[in-house]
Image (spheres, coloured by chain):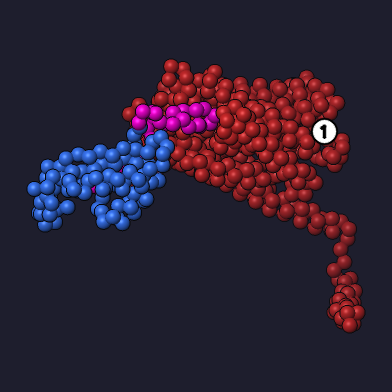
Chain colours: A blue, B red
Amino acid sequence: MTKMYKIEAIIKPHKLSEVKDALEEAGYPSLTVTDVKGRGQQKGIVQQWRGKKYCVDLLPKTKIEIAAPENKIEEIMKIIQSAAYTGEIGDGKIFVIPVETVVRIRTGEQNGDAL
Amino acid sequence: MLKKMEKLNRLPIVTFVLLIALVSPAFAVTADENAASIEEVKTTLTFMWLLLASGLVFFMHAGFSLVETGLTRSKNTANILMKNFMTVVLGILVYWAVGWGIMYGADVAGIIGTNQFFLAGADNAIWNSWFFQMVFAATGATIVSGAMAERTNFKAYLVYCVMMVAVIYPIYGHWVWSGADMALLSGADSPIVKAIGVASHDFAGSGVVHSIGGYSALAGVLLVGSRIGRFKDGKPIPIPGHNLTITFLGTLILALGWLGFNGGSTLNANDPYMNLVVVNTFLAGAAGALTVMIITWIKTGKPDPSLTANGLLGGLVAVTAPCGSISNWAALAIGLVAGIIIYAGVMFNENKLKLDDPVGAIAVHGYCGSWGLISVGLFSIGIGNGILADASYAAQVPGLFYGGGISLLLIQLVSVLVTMVWGFGLSYIIFKILDAVIGLRVSEEEEIAGLDISEHGIRAYPEYLMRED
């Protein structure tokens, strides 16, 4: 049985459509997208309100979740990395997490068949 | 060809003139009757202009609602809209029942009006004046609502609003605008006016409306305290508002309203200085906004939008008292200084006094209102002088910068002092009583949940996920 993984990518919100399109073009249309907040080592950015500076220490980010079998993981990671890349601080992270079971709710199919 | 056309064109006119000549004896009017008709038209024009101006001032309540809503958080939107809305509703009813009578009823000792309650005995002219004065009265309370936004008990605010329109505003208004001989700050027989030698002047209410509102707001902010999280170890922490789009729309609506506020305060559609008033009004507003933009740009590295919007209002508030008594250049100077006052005032309130005024109402209406009163004593040209040769409604004598000495400045300073003592003092007492009887502030849980849910059981934006930070 092939191992399954979930890819969780935290990216800049404005990069979502590029990533989505690149994945779809390569044959990976299925994904879940969530608006999230977070920060990395730089701890956010400084904004201004009525003449006073204040730190926004949690920045809006977009989280993409994709489940895929082992042999596809490398390709998907590469697609996301190149499409979400700007070279600036805050481009985000990709996590790959092993998945034990997948069930398609409509049919009851499991694992590889459910993806 | 052309000439022939002209001749043809003239034919009907000639016929008409001949016809009139034949029948005219039947319509002969005397010079007196003619003059009377002209007077009637002038009166009608004034009625029409005041109705229109009242409409513009009424619309300012939409402006206040939007400015206040945009500068505060989304979880308090419905509450702020309700406060502004009910201010109008109560303003209409209370000013009809009580406020007008106290402000313009038969004078007692220059202190208070005592009849015409419920507009008893009113005629066409009084109904017209009432409507114009009513839309001003509610403004004072609205100023307070913004300064105390996001943490004030709705019920307590409603009671305060009634007190403002019934007592605080009309009594001070009586002292300045009632026209009574004894009227404390403006009547010829008032002991104060006699002692200083000249009546105070507040054209459209830098003091009557704005200072009174602003210093009442100061009392309210002081007693209700800061929003949770506004200061940390005595250091101010910004709480950004949720919608600058409506704040700017509201600011422009307020500016439009000032066309009626100041333009209408000529109280006469035939006043030859109405247009000077309008030009001065907008010059000062623009100068105020530009000044604040430049200051914030220099001070923080970026031009600050909401303070710049405050700058426009600060200029408008300041010029409201002097706009019929000054030159265009003076209006620019007054607006410029108002801009400085806005920035310095907002920073002073926040950094030194540790006051939480989310919309800047104390600086805009209180401080700039006072500056407006003072500026009359500095820049007034004086009735009968220079461009004011034919003026009837302006400060009587020249100000300090126009060779009039200090007497006008002195009575204007007295007015400033009175607005502070009356607006702040009386409001302080009223808020203290309300705090004891009803409770001025919502609970901590209610404040955190937002006043929309805790006071009104609703979200203003139920279908949108708003960022809470």
Q: Is residue A10 above or below residue B416?
A: below
* In the image: residue A25, left or right of residue B434: left
Q: Specify the quadrant of the image occupied by residue B23.
A: bottom right
Residue B86 in sight here: no
Residue B399 position, x and y percent, is: 80, 27
In the image: residue A35, left or right of residue B306: left
Q: Of B438 and A111, which appears nearest the observer?
A: A111
Where is residue A78 drawn, in percent x and y? 30, 45
Image height of B164 relative to B59, above or below? above
Q: Amino acid at mark 1?
A: Ile
Chain name for mark 1: B
Instruction: Give the residue pinned by disc 1.
Output: B381
In the image, the segment drawn in magenta is A40-66
Query: Mark 1 falls on what kind of element?
Result: loop
The answer to if B193 sits in the magenta stretch is: no
Foreground of the two, B236 or A63: A63
Question: Taking the image as drawn, is residue B142 in sight?
Answer: yes
Q: Dot 1, how many residues are within 10 Å of its Cα: few (below 14), some (14-19), or many (20+)?
A: many
